[in-house]
Amino acid sequence: MGQCPFFPKPHKNKASLLTTFLLKRRSWLDGLYEKSYKMKSGQVKMPGFDLYIVNHPKDVRRVMVDEVQKFPKSNWLHQLLKPLLGESIFTTNGGVWQKQRELLRPSFEQARITKVFGLMNEAVEDMMKKLSRYPNGAIIEIDEVMTFVTADVIFRTILSQKLDESQGKEVLDAFVVFQEQTVHTAIRKMFCIPQWISYLLGERKRMRAGDTIRRVLADIIKPRYDAVSAGKGGEYEDILASLLEVIDPQSGERFSFEEILDQVAMLFLAGHETSASSLTWTLYILSISPQEQEKAYQEIYEVAGEEILTLQHLRKLKYVSNIFKESLRLYPPVGFFARTAKQEVKIQNKLVKEGSGVVVAPWLIQRHESYWKNPHEFDPSRFEEKNVIQKDTYLPFGMGERICIGQGFAMQEAVLILANILRNYQLKLQENFVPDVVGRLTIRSANGMQIQFTQRKN
């Protein structure tokens, strides 16, 4: 029998509109009820918005793959994220998205990911030095550590720049504000709260936070953009170098500075925030699963001993990889994918009006009792090669043409970080600590993650 990690206990019945407004201002997970984890489809009526939830694999494939043109990325989401991401691949549609995807693709091909491994490893080595400075047996706020190291990985692999503590604090504090305020802004939009009230209640703070992050990124990118424009600056081998070099085959032009800034802001959001969420939840699960933790340690030691971990080692760490995949199932970093119905369509027995929101929710699908045995239990063996995962029920990176472009990067980073930690430490959740699971842009623990780190005696 596997371990059953914590998840928010759903309400017995569907909440009223007023209760939804009061609950979901903090986290959309708080508005779920028991039937949410069993239904094939659902509907939520808001004063200014109709929302349809799609849980059945056939309908998931229809929205994400087969009829993707009928269900473009939500313009509503685009407007919410624009202060930070501008016109980036994360929210654009149609020809703009296709052009951006094609121009970004070379930066995330396996050869490029392999090339930036050394930069990734330097960030992880610094994380390990930071952990070694704690006294043996210390309780560590690991959510903060994971947020910093994944941001550092992004800065080094994309920008060839180490994230220093003061710069990191400014950027990451701004991102916390942006996340929290975006949830509030979304709920106010759903309930048709006037824009001027929204501005007074926190929208101004949200816009400022987005500007702060973009300013830090722009100050790093601009000198290199100008150097390449002047025919210089070819000494870098990071992802930004690839973005600066790529040429649109149709126009013969490179990305403009603003386009580069938008894409790097997107890579920062998608690259550090989702990885930080996933790694924090994985370490939490391992901290309450001593047997799986020891099994992972044995695999790491058999594969690499005390050698510095290489890419070749990582490829052999199948069990560590399966632990991370199972953690992504239980705590997908992006709990829902928002789409818009471009025309009137029928899903299950519901008529979805043109312009309505359509949500595919990995959080619900990956915990759905019709598709998974003991869905809330942690069981890495689900991902062994002999087992077949039912199609369209596991989608932490999305699916179809919009599947996460950085999936390979994220898996490499996660296994590297986990292997380094597990080889050196035994983990145990602080006694009586219960994570406060919230759904914002990503699924995080609002009260952090308190884990005891005890040094291993190799």
Image (cartoon, rainbow, N blue to C red):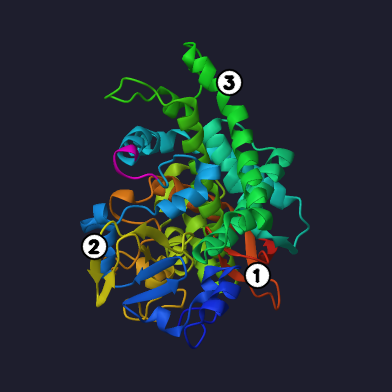
Check the image and name the residue furthest to the right: 135
Q: Residues within 10 Å of mark 3 (few under 14, many from 20)?
A: few
Report the span colored magenta: 92-96
Residue at the spot x=39%, y=56% of the render? 397
Q: Are marks 2 and 1 in contact (CB under 8 Å)?
A: no
Q: Which amino acid type is marked by label 1?
A: Lys
Seen in the image, is 118 located left or right of residue 411? right
Q: Nearer the viewer, residue 330 or 29?
A: 29
Seen in the image, is 352 located left or right of residue 206? left
Rendered position, 191 above or below 199: below
Report if residue 431 lies within the magenta region.
no
Residue at the spot x=30%, y=60% of the render? 341
x, y percentage for residue 448? Answer: 67, 64
The residue labelled by disc 1 is: 428
Classify residue 20 by image quadrant. Answer: bottom right
Q: Secondary structure at mark 3?
A: helix
Seen in the image, is 55 located left or right of residue 446? left
Residue 62: assigned label: 2
Q: Which amino acid type is marked by label 2?
A: Arg
The residue labelled by disc 3 is: 223
